[in-house]
């Protein structure tokens, strides 16, 4: 067995054990590219070793996705068939734990009709709404990981040949997920404890709002009453710990969708709907986007903001210190899983129900009344830098430094 094959097996085992915490009798859904068949097999084996009752593979293919977007009859493209929604219902009925493996070319749909792309995103988002809501309420464990592909690697390392670039990207994936350590599971336990400790500090503070300042940014983002900061392992509704993202360096909560005012600029490219969006700037008033621009991908951004009413507000606020390992690598990954863990970030669209006390038991209307944004979209974008300062505003109006020059103030 080569070193790479050994690392791939360790990665699969970490994903199954620490990631979604597979237990006897579980149904597992793996969403993964056809080019990552060995990883799919390794994860499947790891899940069955832990007692899974069923592992379902949902194969993805960039080329087929692009061909469908270009040529498929529009009525077929925009109307999700019953058998597909019935499959989603099956997942929900069996409490499926989901593993999403990201490896797509960030520019896979570049140059295609943005109206058509946006309409497909909206249709698919609506079809997946119940699954998304269950995910955002942590009804079952879930995880997002990544796998290197030549097209994605070339975007990250454009000066290298495809094989060299792919090898370098795999090295970064293994490093940031701690696979390069002797015992990745123990390493993740220690890392999780550190993130949980920082979340506990913020939960004790219960700030009314956060005030962000940096070049191109001056914004105050309200936080709902009884909000919860999460860092490291999450917990599913059945009390099972799991890690939703690998890698992860963030501590995050929900915004008060009714109390966001000011302007903020993105600091890293965003890969969204097969396109790259860059140098975005958003202006908010009373919780809503009133102006948004992007130097690259502006047409795609405007279509995103038409998805539904909720996409024009924020669902998530996440804090990541600039000295974090992914940030210090100085690599732009063109992949939200990595880039969001190199930078403070926000998310347009829906908030996670578990970000407020009792939220997982609330109805959609109750969540909205509590200030948690509701939408079929959830799109993270990166805003942090070594020049960013953040102050916590308490209910009595006093101000507490949270971030200074891109790092924790303490």
Image (tube, grey):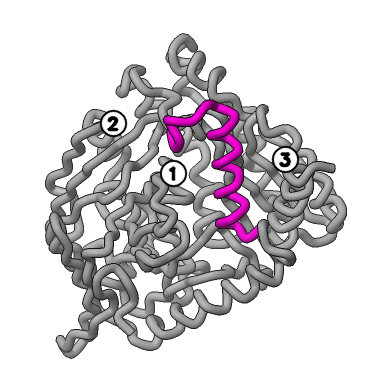
Q: At 80% from the left edge and 42% from the top edge, which residue is drawn?
A: 2
Secondary structure beneath dot 3 equals: helix
Is residue 179 at all visible to an observer of this figure?
A: yes
Q: Quadrant of the C terminus?
A: bottom left
User: Quick one: 77 or 260, which is closer to the camera?
Assistant: 260
Instruction: From the top left corner, tell me how far across and down residue 332 is, in percent.
Output: 39, 45
Disc on res. 300: 2
Is residue 237 at all visible to an observer of this figure?
A: no
- The residue mark sitting in front, 2 or 1, is 1
Disc on res. 39: 3
Q: Main SS of the magenta segment? A: helix
Residue with the mark numbered 1: 333
| Residue 250 shown left or right of residue 396 in the figure | right
Query: Which residues lie in the magenta part?
Result: 155-179
Secondary structure beneath dot 1 equals: loop
Which quadrant holds residue 327?
Answer: bottom left
Instruction: From the top left corner, tell me how far across and down residue 123 is, in percent.
Output: 44, 31
Disc nearer the start of the sequence (2/1)? 2
Q: Quadrant of the N terminus?
A: top right
Give the answer, above or below, for where 171 lies relative to 304.
Answer: below
Give the answer, above or below, for where 158 lies relative to 317.
Answer: above
Around disc 1, counting alpha carbons within 10 Å, would you say few (fewer than 14), some (14 to 19), or many (20 or more)?
A: many
């Amino acid at each position: 067995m080569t070193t790479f094959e050994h690392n791939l097996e360790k990665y699969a085992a970490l994903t199954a054990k620490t990631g979604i915490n597979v237990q006897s009798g579980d149904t597992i859904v793996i969403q993964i590219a056809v080019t990552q068949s060995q990883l799919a097999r390794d994860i499947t084996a790891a899940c069955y070793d832990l007692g899974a009752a069923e592992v379902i593979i949902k194969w993805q293919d960039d080329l087929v996705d692009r061909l469908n977007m270009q040529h498929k009859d529009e009525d077929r493209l925009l109307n999700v068939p019953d058998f597909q929604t019935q499959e989603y219902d099956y997942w929900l009925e069996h409490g499926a734990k989901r593993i999403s493996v990201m490896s797509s070319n960030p520019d896979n749909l570049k140059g295609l009709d943005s109206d058509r792309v946006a309409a497909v995103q909206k249709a698919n988002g609506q079809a997946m709404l119940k699954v998304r809501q269950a995910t955002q309420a942590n009804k079952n464990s879930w995880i997002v990981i990544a796998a290197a592909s030549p097209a994605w690697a070339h975007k990250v390392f454009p000066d290298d040949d495809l094989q060299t670039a792919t090898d370098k990207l795999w090295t970064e994936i293994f490093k940031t997920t701690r696979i390069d350590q002797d015992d990745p599971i123990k390493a993740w336990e220690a890392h999780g404890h550190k993130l949980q400790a920082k979340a506990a500090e913020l939960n004790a503070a219960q700030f009314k709002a956060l005030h962000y300042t940096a070049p191109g940014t001056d914004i105050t983002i309200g936080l709902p009453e009884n909000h919860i900061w999460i860092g490291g392992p999450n917990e599913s509704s059945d009390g099972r710990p799991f890690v939703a993202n690998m890698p992860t360096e963030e501590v995050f909560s929900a915004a008060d969708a009714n109390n966001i005012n000011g302007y903020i600029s993105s600091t890293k490219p965003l890969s969204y709907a097969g396109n790259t969006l860059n140098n975005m700037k958003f202006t908010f008033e009373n919780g809503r986007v009133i102006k948004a621009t992007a130097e690259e991908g502006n047409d795609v951004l405007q279509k995103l903001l038409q998805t539904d009413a909720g996409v024009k507000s924020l669902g998530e606020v996440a804090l990541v210190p600039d000295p974090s390992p992914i940030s210090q690598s100085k690599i732009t990954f063109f992949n939200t899983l990595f880039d969001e863990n190199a930078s403070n970030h926000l998310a347009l669209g829906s908030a996670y129900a578990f970000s407020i006390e009792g939220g997982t038991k609330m109805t959609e209307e109750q969540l909205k009344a509590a200030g948690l944004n509701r939408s079929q979209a959830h799109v993270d974008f990166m805003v942090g830098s070594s020049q960013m300062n953040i102050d916590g505003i308490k209910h009595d109006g006093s101000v507490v430094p949270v971030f200074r020059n891109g790092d924790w103030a303490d």
